Image (cartoon, rainbow, N blue to C red):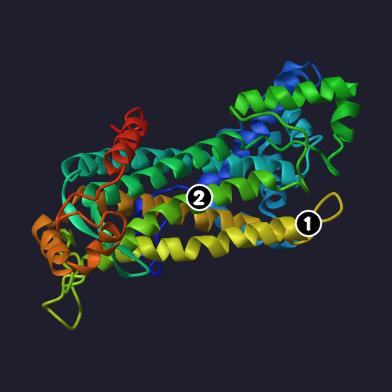
Amino acid sequence: MTDLLWPGDERAGDIFADAAVLAAMIRVEAAWLGALADAGIAPPPAADELHGLVDDADIATIAAGAEAGGNPVIALLGLVRPRLAARNAAAASWLHKGLTSQDTLDTALALCLRPAVGAILEHIAEQVGSLSALARRHRSTPMAGRTLTQHAVPITAGLRFATWLIQILDARERLTAASAALPVQLGGAAGSLAAVAALAGTPEAARRLVAATAAALDLPARDPWHTSRIPVTGIGDALVTCTDAWGRLANDVLTGSRPEIGELVEEPGEGRGGSSAMPNKRNPVLAVLVRRAALAGPPLAATLHAAAAATLDERADGAWHVEWATIRALARRTVTAAAQTSELLRHLRVDADRMAATLAAARPGIDAEQRSVSPGARAGTPYAGAADQIIDAALDRARPVGP
C-alpha cells in the first residue's frame, strides 16, 4: 500500500492491505470448515484450506460487490462458493454454514491486527534500548526543567529520557494486554449460536466448535460480542496510548531543536529535512510526522467509541461498518509512527553544552524553589531529588524489554 497524503505509510508494508484482509477472511472460513469436519458435523471432505480460490485480481470485484450487501464477506462468498464447488462439492455445501458476515469479518480484523501489533512491539523494543542508553549516558547531564513552557527547577537530561521511557513501557503493557484479548467472533445471525447449536446437536457442542475454531486461528475463544465492542475500543485505545507516548517525546524534540534552544538535534538522514524554498532548512521531519500521528490517533479511537455507543439490538446498523476503515487507518498509522520514532531516537543528538548554558543563563531564578526550602544552600548545590532512583527504576523495568 501507498498513501501520498500520509508520508511514511509505506513503512507499514502490507499490514491491513486489501490482500491481507482478503487472506484473513479466507483463513476464518477455512478454520470453520475444519472445525465442522473435525467434530463430525460435516463430512471429512468438507475440510478445505480454501487455497487458490481467490487472489489479488479478485479484490476489485469483491470491493465493488461489497456495496450490495454492505460488507465484503457476502461478495467474497459469492466468488468462492462456485469455484470451490468445482473442486470440492462437500466443502462448498458447508462453506459459511452457521456463521454470519460479522463473524467472518470481525475475526479477520483480529487476525490483521496481529502483524500490526507485532511490528509495533518490535519497534518499541528498539526504542526502549535507545532510551535506556540515553538515560544512562545523560544521568548527570544538567539541564533546565520546564513547566508550562517556562524554566522551573534544574533537572538532568537522564530524568527527561527516563520519563519518555516510562511512558513507552506503559504503552507497551496496554498494547500487549489489548492484543492478547482480541477474540474470535462466532455467534451466528443474532449472536445466539442458534444455527451452530442446531448443526452440532447441543449448545455445549456449539461452544466446543467455537473453541476449536479459535484454537485453529490462535485467538482466544469468547461468547459472541457482535454488539459488545470492548475488544475493538480496547485495541484502539491501546494503539493511541502508543502514539500519545511518541507524540510527547516528539514535542520535546521539536521544542528542544528550535535554533534558539538547540538542546536536541534530530540528525537528518540523506535527503531528509529539506525545504522546497529554503535551502538552509534542516527540519526535524521525523518528529513532525510522529506528532502528526499523535494528533490524528485520538479522533480515530473516538470514532470507535462512538460506534460502540451507537450499537443496538443484536447487530448494528452502520456503527459496526464504520469500524473497519477506522481500525485499518489507526493500525497502519501507529505502525508507521512506531518506525519513525525508532529512527528518530536512533539518531537523536543531545547537546549537553547547550543544556548547561541554558541552565546557567536561567540562574539565579531557576534556583528559587531550592532557596525557599533550603535557605542556606549555595548556588549550584545539587537539587536532584530522587532523579537517580527514578532513572534506575525505569532502567530496571526496561531491561527485559530492550534488545
Circles 2 and 1 in contact, beta carbons < 8 Å: no
The image shows residue 2, relative to residue 44, as above or below, that is below
Residue 66 in sight here:
no
Q: Position of residue 165 (x, y in %)?
A: 34, 44
Q: Is residue 39 left or right of residue 172?
A: right
Quadrant of residue 209 within the rendered picture: top right
Q: Residue furthest left?
A: 353
In the foreground, 170 or 46 = 170
Horizontally, is 101 left or right of 236 in the view? right
In 3D space, how far apart are the residues under numbered discs 2 and 1 (Cα atoms)? 22 Å
The crowd level at tag 2 (other Cα within 10 Å; few <14, some 14-19, many 20+) is many
Q: Secondary structure at mark 1?
A: loop
Which three-letter amino acid code belongs to the residue tagged 1? Answer: Thr
Point out residue 346 in the picture as x, y percentages from the top left corner.
21, 48
Residue type beneath disc 2? Leu
Residue at horizontal 78 percent and vertical 56 percent from the top: 311
Residue 41 falls in image quadrant: top right
Point out which mark residue 88 bears.
Answer: none
Point out residue 181 in the picture as x, y percentages from the top left corner: 61, 35
Name the residue at the front extreme: 376
Residue 38 or 145: which is nearer the viewer?
Answer: 145
Q: In the rendered image, which residue does mark 2 sit on?
A: 239
Looking at this view, is 143 or 128 the one in front? 143
Total marks shown come to 2
Asked if residue 50 shows in the view, the reply is: yes
Q: Which residue is mark 1?
A: 311
Q: What SS does tag 2 mark?
A: helix
Q: Residues within 10 Å of mark 1 (few under 14, many from 20)?
A: some
Q: Quadrant of residue 32?
A: top right
Where in the figure is residue 195, as x and y percent of width and height?
88, 34
